[in-house]
Image (cartoon, rainbow, N blue to C red):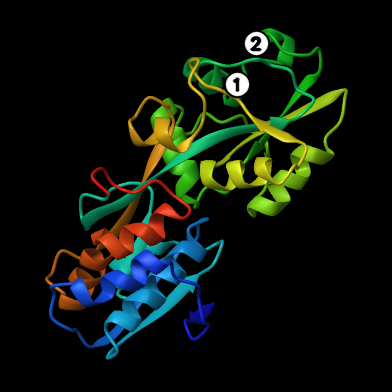
Amino acid sequence: MIVRLLCACWVSIVALAGFSSLSHAEVAGSLVIAGNGPENTTIETLAHAFEKANPRAYVDLLWEDNSKPVDMVKSGQAHIAITGWEDPTLAGKQIGWDGIGILVHLSNFTKEITKQQVAELFSGKFATWADVGGPDTRILLIDRPRNQNIRDAFESQLGIAGKISETAKVIGQDDKVVKAVVGTLPPLSAVTFISLSTGLSVVSTGVAVRLLPIDKIEPEAPTVKDGRYPLRRPIMLLSKKDANPLVEAFAQFALSAPGQAIIAETYVPMPNH
């Protein structure tokens, strides 16, 4: 579904103040960005701000849960794919970080979990939460669709590509995932992985969920930024390796002070920002 960025997206004062300081020359033309993950709102705001800084540039978002952004770039349907990994056949530019949170019901008193236990948990090696020091309830695994970038990053970092239990329930949209965790009650206790920015937002609003510390490290922005939190994924812009001034200008804007201010509203900006 094409979402034309004509809505008035709120942009931080810091970002607005930085428009005039950008050094790149004004660019013109249409830029198509494809994605399927939780970054939609952030990229939409970033693209709207880019259009303001470059009045002759137009950005279209192709954002669909079941789309394949990388394939869309390779086939020429899009100029940029938003992903959580690199592709050796494409040019990549990292513009931020996002943690991957392990979400459980608030009543699940499992104190913490190790990275190795997370891998074993989603591989189906544990039957109950008591196996990892939690309640004596059965584990209900909630997986994410195979095409979503958060799933690829999750599998890759844990070394469990192709090993997530086939008994796991697959849910795509974050709001439905959270509802499934909240609505799963004893004798079952659900667990899923979710964008840390989304998970922290849900927890802050008082929803009956919590995020498990991993290897004794709390899941929060500072620990993601300095790398102490062991599950994190880069937010990448992937494009064809052929030079494209519009793509390069957007990447430059995303890494500029105003662009990073927008990213920091939801995700973890790059170092030195």
Percent position (x, y) of residue 210?
A: 68, 32
Which numbered circle lies on residue 121?
1
Cα separation, mark 1 vs mark 2, equals: 9 Å
Q: Is residue 10 left or right of residue 23?
A: right
Residue type indicated by callout 2:
Val
Residue type indicated by callout 1:
Leu
The residue at which mark 2 appears reads as 132
- Classify 262 as above or below 200: below
- Residue 182: image quadrant is top right
Asked if marks 1 and 2 touch (Cβ < 8 Å), the reply is yes
Specify few, some or many for label 1: CA neighbours under 10 Å numbering under 14, 14-19, or 20 or more. Answer: many
Q: Quadrant of the N terminus?
A: bottom right
Specify few, some or many for label 2: CA neighbours under 10 Å numbering under 14, 14-19, or 20 or more. Answer: some
- Residue 26: image quadrant is bottom left
Residue at 78% in and 37% down = 208
Residue at 20% in and 55% down = 89
